[in-house]
Image (tube, rainbow, N blue to C red):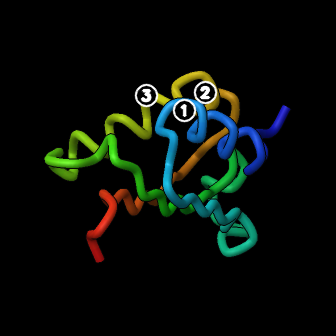
Amino acid sequence: MAVSSHEIEAALREALQPDSLAITDDSHLHAGHAGALEGRHFSVQVVSAQFNDLSRLKRHRLVYDALRTLIPRGIHALAIEARAPGES
């Protein structure tokens, strides 16, 4: 069963209590690409107070941890923009 953007949204909202969250399914941009057969491509823009004082790597780890049960179900690629409130 393919992972939906709604499932990603629910997992991130539960784990990160974001101030803002946007998820884009970019799979159509990768049609014909070998990895397109292995899963879907998503972009995530998330703003959460949980990212305060964390490095970019630690922020990404929090996102991946929140999605750990979904990734093996069909997320092939994930572009992450993770910011703390007040960051541009």
Distance from Cα at disc 1 to Cα at disc 2 = 9 Å
**Image quadrant where residue 13 sits:** top right
Residue at (55% x, 62% y) in the render: 43
Relative to 29, 44 lies left or right: left
**Image quadrant where residue 61 sits:** top left
Picture disc at residue 67:
1
How many numbered marks have been drawn onto this rendered protein structure? 3
Q: Secondary structure at mark 3?
A: helix
Instruction: Judge the density around disc 1: few (<14), some (14-19), many (≥20) Cα neighbours within 10 Å.
Output: some
Picture disc at residue 72:
2
Residue 41 location, x and y as percent?
A: 62, 57
Residue at (33% x, 61% y) in the render: 85
Q: Nearer the viewer, mark 1 or mark 2?
A: 1
Residue type for callout 3 = Asp
Give the quadrant of the N terminus.
top right
Relative to 15, 22 lies left or right: right
Instruction: Judge the density around disc 3: few (<14), some (14-19), many (≥20) Cα neighbours within 10 Å.
Output: some
Residue 14 location, x and y as percent?
A: 59, 31
Residue type for callout 2 = Pro
Distance from Cα at disc 2 to Cα at disc 3 = 12 Å
Asked if marks 3 and 1 touch (Cβ < 8 Å), the reply is yes
In this view, 72 is above or below 21: above
Disc 3 target residue: 65
Residue at (50% x, 56% y) in the render: 19
In this view, 69 is above or below 84: above
Q: Secondary structure at mark 1?
A: loop
